[in-house]
Image (cartoon, rainbow, N blue to C red):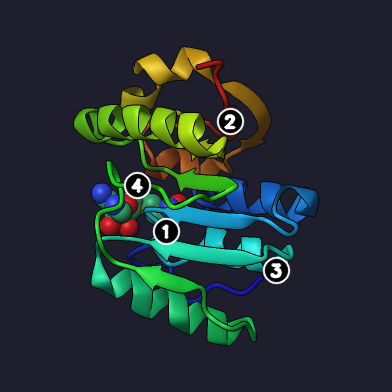
Amino acid sequence: MCMRFWCIFYWPQLTTPPCRFLLDNPGVCLGKRVLDVGSGCGASAIAAKLCGAAHVVANDIDTVAAVATHMNCELNGLEPPICVMDNMIGSESGGFDLILLGDMFYDEALATSLHSWLNRCIETHGADVLIGDPGRAQFEGHDIRRLLRQLAEYELPESVREENYGLTCSSVWRYHPEL
Ligand SMILES: C[S@@+](CC[C@H](N)C(=O)[O-])C[C@H]1O[C@@H](n2cnc3c(N)ncnc32)[C@H](O)[C@@H]1O
């Protein structure tokens, strides 16, 4: 998978694990309706498309994210996903089978609104939720953290550890509590 527009939106090695996980486990996306929230450069949405998802929506409130996603799709020879720039957090989720969140728990207020919205998506549509996080303090300390099941862990290279203030690995988690 080629990614060019990563200077702003693609955090190398922090973003890679969710994509790596999808590419290594294509059955997770196959035939599914997938929503990538906070999609940035579109890395996870593109991985979902490459893995045979039936329908992919990349959602990011930053308009530049949609431009980067289109460019990265072109680079990968793919039709771009539908790019939605509205804030979908808190809204009706629209019946997605799988919701992806890569490095979205970097702010406590955002994490809390995501948590209650994800509960609603699971309750109303039975959505499956995968979260990628490099072990940020806001994520590790949040209530949602103890409700997650770790699916994969990837070590960060030395250079990335140095640049990211003590982060040592990045993980992919599944959130599917009994509600
Ligand atoms: C740390 S970046 C992660 C980007 C991408 N998921 C990745 O792993 O590379 C967070 C992204 O979330 C987006 N974002 C922040 N609040 C959002 C919201 N309410 N809805 C959608 N996207 C949001 C930002 O614009 C940014 O692109």
- For label 3, the SS is helix
The percent position of residue 152, horizontal first and vertical second, equals 68, 33
- Left/right of residue 137 with respect to residue 20 in the rendered view: left
Per the image, the residue denoted by label 2 is: 173
> Sequence-wise, which precedes: disc 1 or disc 2?
1
Badge 1 vs badge 2, beta-carbon distance below 8 Å: no
Answer above or below: position of 59 versus 70: above
Q: Give the residue type at disc 2.
A: Trp
> Sequence-wise, which precedes: disc 3 or disc 4?
3
Answer whether residue 155 is visible to the viewer in this image.
yes
Q: Give the residue type at disc 3.
A: Leu
Badge 3 vs badge 2, beta-carbon distance below 8 Å: no
> Sequence-wise, which precedes: disc 1 or disc 3?
1
Per the image, the residue denoted by label 3 is: 50
The mark found on residue 92 in the picture is: 4
The percent position of residue 3, horizontal first and vertical second, equals 54, 72
